[in-house]
Image (tube, rainbow, N blue to C red):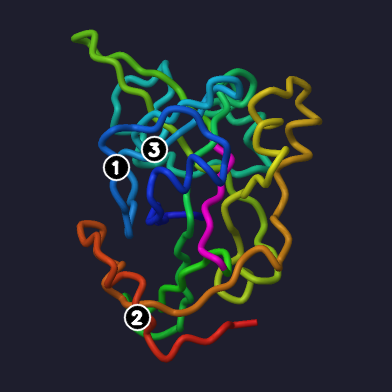
């Protein structure tokens, strides 16, 4: 799964590196983005404007918004068929902006002793997760837009830490995700990124607290070394 990520770069860098349109005025670096929080999303390949959405998909037909807490991720293998995701897969796909993500290595010891690792590009440049979005309206007419990150089997870089990873879309693939129509073409994009795309190192357990959002989250747990 993908339960935490980062958007540490400035808005201008995301805009330039990814070829984006208008960015939110209230952009600020985030070191520990957690479920239920607002995340930066692109839904249109032409305008490429960046919007804020709640992380945790609430389908339009849901009775309450609480279901979003259970839908922070969607599995690539079943996303086209699951009732919660299949309509969004067909009609409401999105890109979720990031420049790193965390996964935890289970040590087999007591609860809470898992070691968090930070995965990022060698140059810390931004990238995009493959995602889905939906729009839900409550009884008072208030609209909530929300999203989920699609995950796939881990590549050889992530696998020593966790069995799954977010789908990362590079270059032309990211815009194809928003414009393609045929299910088989879309499914072909939902594969692990090349193992050379990411590097990783163990970080402070401060990231375990979803309310803690600081550069401290990225501090190495020991002298920084590449895992691979």
Q: Is residue 22 in the magenta section?
A: no
Residue 89, placed above or below residue 56:
above
Q: Residue at x 39, y 28 (%)?
A: 51
Magenta stretch in the rendered image: 123-131
Q: Which mark is residue 113?
A: 2
Q: Circle 1: is it few (<14), some (14-19), or many (20+) Cα within 10 Å? A: few
Residue drawn at point x = 52 percent, y = 34 percent:
20
Q: Secondary structure at mark 3?
A: loop
Pinpoint residue 134: horizontal percent, then vertical percent: 45, 22
Q: Residue at x 34, y 83 (%)?
A: 110
As drawn, is 182 to the left or to the right of 110?
Answer: right
> In the image shown, does 178 or 112 lie closer to the viewer?
178
Q: Residue furthest bottom?
A: 223
Sequence-first tag of 3 and 1: 1
Query: Residue 98 location, x and y as percent?
Result: 47, 50
Q: In terms of depth relative to the viewer, which is nearer, 210 or 121? A: 121
Question: Residue 37 bears which disc, if any?
Answer: 1
Q: How far is disc 3 from disc 1 in space, using C-alphas? A: 8 Å
Measured in 3D between alpha carbons, the distance from the residue under mark 2 to the one under mark 1, in whole angstroms, is 25 Å
Q: Is residue 132 found left or right of 3 in the rendered image?
A: right
Residue picked out by circle 3: 56
Is disc 3 surrounded by few (<14), some (14 to 19) or many (20+) residues within 10 Å? many
- On the rendered structure, is 34 left or right of 18? left
The tag on residue 184 is none
Q: Where is residue 211 shown, x and y percent of the image?
A: 20, 57
Residue 102, quarter of picture: bottom left
Residue placed at 43% from the left, 30% from the top? 50
Q: Is residue 215 above or below residue 115?
A: above
- Could you tell me how far apart the alpha carbons at marks 2 and 3 are, in whole angstroms? 26 Å
Is the residue marked by circle 2 packed among few (<14), some (14-19), or many (20+) residues within 10 Å? few
Could you tell whether 196 is left or right of 206 in the image? right
């Amino acid at each position: 799964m993908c339960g935490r990520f980062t958007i540490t770069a400035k808005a201008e860098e995301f805009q330039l590196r990814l070829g984006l349109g208008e960015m939110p005025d209230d952009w600020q670096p985030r070191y520990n983005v957690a479920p239920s929080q607002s995340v930066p999303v692109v839904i249109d390949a032409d305008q490429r404007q960046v919007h804020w959405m709640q992380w945790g998909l609430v389908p339009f037909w849901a009775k309450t918004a609480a279901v979003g807490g259970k839908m922070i991720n969607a599995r690539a293998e079943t996303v086209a068929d699951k009732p919660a995701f299949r309509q969004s897969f067909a009609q409401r796909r999105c890109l979720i902006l990031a420049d790193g993500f965390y996964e935890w290595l289970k040590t087999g010891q007591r609860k809470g002793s898992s070691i968090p690792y930070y995965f990022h590009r060698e140059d810390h440049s931004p990238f995009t997760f493959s995602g889905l979005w939906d729009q839900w309206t409550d009884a008072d007419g208030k609209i909530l837009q929300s999203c989920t990150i699609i995950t796939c089997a881990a590549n050889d870089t992530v696998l020593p830490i966790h069995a799954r990873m977010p789908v990362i879309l590079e270059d032309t693939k990211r815009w194809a995700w928003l414009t393609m129509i045929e299910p088989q073409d879309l499914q072909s994009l939902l594969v692990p990124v090349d193992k050379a795309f990411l590097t990783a190192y163990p970080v402070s357990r401060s990231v375990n607290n979803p309310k803690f959002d600081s550069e401290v989250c990225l501090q190495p747990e020991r002298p920084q070394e590449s895992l691979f």
